[in-house]
Image (cartoon, coloured by chain):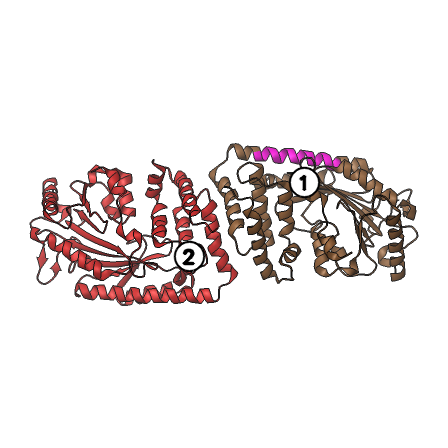
Chain colours: A brown, B red
Amino acid sequence: MAKRDLLAHPIEWVKGKGSNSNIAVSSRIRLARNLSDFPFTHRCDHEKLYAIVDQVKQVISDSDLLKDSDVVEMDALDSLSRWVLVEKHLISPPFAGDGPGRLVIVDSKGVISIMVNEEDHLRIQVILAGLELNEVWRIAKKVEMMFEKLGYAFDSDFGYLAACPTNVGTGMRASVMVHIPALEMSKQITTLINECNRIGLTVRGTYGEGSDVLGSLYQISNQITLGLGEEELIDKVASAVRQIVTEEERARAVMKRKLDSSLDDRLWRAFGVMRYCRNISTREALELISLIKMGSDMEITPKLSVEDWNNLVLGVQPNHVQLYAGKELTPDERDVYRAAFLRERLKSIEPK
Amino acid sequence: MAKRDLLAHPIEWVKGKGSNSNIAVSSRIRLARNLSDFPFTHRCDHEKLYAIVDQVKQVISDSDLLKDSDVVEMDALDSLSRWVLVEKHLISPPFAGDGPGRLVIVDSKGVISIMVNEEDHLRIQVILAGLELNEVWRIAKKVEMMFEKLGYAFDSDFGYLAACPTNVGTGMRASVMVHIPALEMSKQITTLINECNRIGLTVRGTYGEGSDVLGSLYQISNQITLGLGEEELIDKVASAVRQIVTEEERARAVMKRKLDSSLDDRLWRAFGVMRYCRNISTREALELISLIKMGSDMEITPKLSVEDWNNLVLGVQPNHVQLYAGKELTPDERDVYRAAFLRERLKSIEPK
């Protein structure tokens, strides 16, 4: 399989078909599993890593669920391609580095992705658009059961074992990406973060732990994986997100009711700058994209579909910009090509 | 004559037909004259002021040059209309206030305007586009000679007498408005001001003494009116302006040669903001207009003719904005209507 195929792979969540996908961009569940016959990844030699890879490949070729998947050795991808996969949320940032015996599997719809020999032997990930954690969980369980025949490392006291103690137990992280510009503008974000922490949830940036919040995109996820069942954890995240969605909608309604020309101006200037700029950073681009999405939702600036929005957010990422340019670029050159990408896309949603 | 006629009066300089009118926007000469039969304006009672008005009107109705002029009593104009005339450079800011026996005369082409009973009995002003001080002087002399029959206050030692000592002598101020964004950006403006001062010239803001510099528009004029002949003063101003035009062109050429994406970006963003903003101050509007004019001259942003540019500069002034809205506005409302005016005008120069 050529690397271009994987880069052009359809990604289901990008289409935006899910409940509340205007605000709850995507729901994701990640399960960490290890095989009891092998030491943890960082203690495996090459031979063992490839043995794991072979076992996983065997399961996939025997399965109905993943038989049309793309199965790609990470070593076969250049650095740009790997980072594009990170930006698409198909693999984690550490997985984009170098290392032997690592595999990524993406199903034909771009719903399921599996990293083999990341921190754990298996990292099963399922993403859908909208607040759809239950459906995501249903699929994740199916994938998890498929690999069960390889023998998971499990302890009757602790649950599933994992390379990092924070993942021991369910090995699950359930997270929802939310777009909450109105809560950010109205300074309610600090309260929200504190509330989430109080009930055992974490609020992170766009690309997970330690990453910046860009374009008002926040990830809400469970902090702990031990002591509660999967369904309980999922319910906790889902119910927090439902409340955040309601609060964001309320904050937007308040803004819309007392719409002053400074907000109107801010939203429209964002549109004008994106339409004509010649040089723009990732951070500024994501801020402006956030504003025009909010403006579209509030029926102030031109209609921007969830799919077009998701494609803009992905398209301005540093590695997607290089994909757009068709070549490697310096950071300064990226800012120029990013502007060209935005101008081209914005043209199609320009008001008459 | 209805006040609307004067507000909609053609203004010759706005059309931009004159040499170097891309940079040397307009050339203006103002002559201060007083009638020897009357005390200076501030010492005239109502009767004397109206006597002067009557004598001036008589000269006009007898003349060929001004027979199609609009002759308007300032008292007949509301405050908005007076300030629109200030913004058009037809009258001075002090003349827009209240006071009896004041008259403004504007010839049919909008080249000549005469204020009667401003600081001096007669303030004769002639404006043309471009660097055209010689032609402006030719016309100003004709108008001045026309009123000579009323008997000018003249002293064989001092020359023409004026209410303010700084105007005694020739009673002349020759000024040229220049648009020099590149000299401003490249920080050469301080040197330029010092150089002008050294040779007896003054550099002022857009609306004369004490006014701010807005949109990179500077007025270059003679500081003294005594001790040199009119032609000498005019030559001095004209030769300084010729040099400034050359330097501005050189600064733009340097910028164009090493055009980096940050200048490109700045010029295009100015276009984008003007095209889509919903709220904008006079100061910001003039800055953006200056940038897109420079961008047009440098063949970077869409073509903006000198006439369209002059109309933008006039149109964003506070009183022109109210004229555009067709009603009096608060300062906040003006910012909203100014944005609407810019959006409407920019639409027509949008790139395909």
The residue under the point 6% across, 49% down is: B37
Residue under pointer 2: B296
Subunit ID for the residue under disc 2 = B
B188 with respect to B170 (left or right): right
Answer left or right for A46 relative to B60.
right
Residue at screen point 9% across, 57% down: B154
Dominant SS of magenta comes to helix
Q: Is residue A213 visible?
A: no
* B118 sits to left or right of A101: left
Magenta segment boundaries in residue numbering = A236-252
Name the spot of residue B209 as percent of width and height, x first. 28, 54
Q: Is residue A318 visible?
A: yes
Q: Which residue is mark 1?
A: A16
- Magenta segment includes B301: no
Quadrant for the N terminus of chain A in the image: bottom right
User: What amino acid type is highlighted by mark number 2?
Assistant: Ser
Q: Is residue B149 above or below residue B74?
A: below
